[in-house]
Image: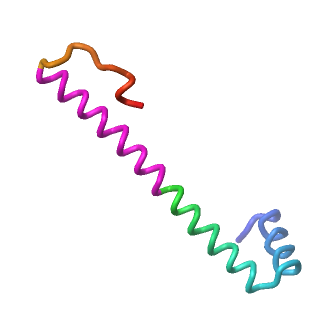
Amino acid sequence: MCYLTQCNAELFGRKRFGEKDVKAVLHRLDRLTQDEARTAEAEILNVIYGLVQNMNVVMDGEQTLIHSSTIC
């Protein structure tokens, strides 16, 4: 089941561009969405890694303050 606006958009796309072109555009959009999700995951992991490194430094007693500039 699809929403009315989604159905209308798909119908418009098929009439305007043809079935083959709509499938190609949807496939490309899906790939781009997956790429964007992977990029966001990599950024999140990078931030978490930085936080863990800062925590290790503090726990080892080498530093008393966590510098926020190392996180960003």
Measured along the vertical axis of the image, is residue 37 above or below residue 28? above
Place of residue 47 in the rendered image (x, y in percent of width and height, measured from the top left): 37, 38
The number of callouts visible is: 0
Place of residue 41 in the rendered image (x, y in percent of width and height, measured from the top left): 43, 51
Place of residue 32 in the rendered image (x, y in percent of width and height, measured from the top left): 58, 64
Place of residue 8 in the rendered image (x, y in percent of width and height, measured from the top left): 84, 69
Q: Is residue 48 magenta?
A: yes
| Left or right: 61 as drawn, with respect to 15 | left
| Left or right: 39 as drawn, with respect to 12 | left
Query: As drawn, which residue projects farthest toward the top?
Result: 64
Measured along the vertical axis of the image, is residue 42 above or below residue 69? below
| Left or right: 17 as drawn, with respect to 39 | right
| Image quadrant where one finds the C terminus | top left
Report which quarter residue 20 is drawn in.
bottom right
Tell me the chief SS of the magenta region. Answer: helix
Question: Which residue is pictured at 84% across the width and 76% down the height?
Answer: 11
Query: As drawn, which residue projects farthest toward the front?
Result: 69
Task: Give the residues drawn in magenta, as a range.
Answer: 38-60
Q: Is residue 44 magenta?
A: yes
Question: Which residue is pictured at 67% across the width and 73% down the height?
Answer: 26
Figure colour scheme: rainbow
| Left or right: 50 as drawn, with respect to 2 | left
Measured along the vertical axis of the image, is residue 49 above or below residue 7? above
| Image quadrant where one finds the N terminus | bottom right
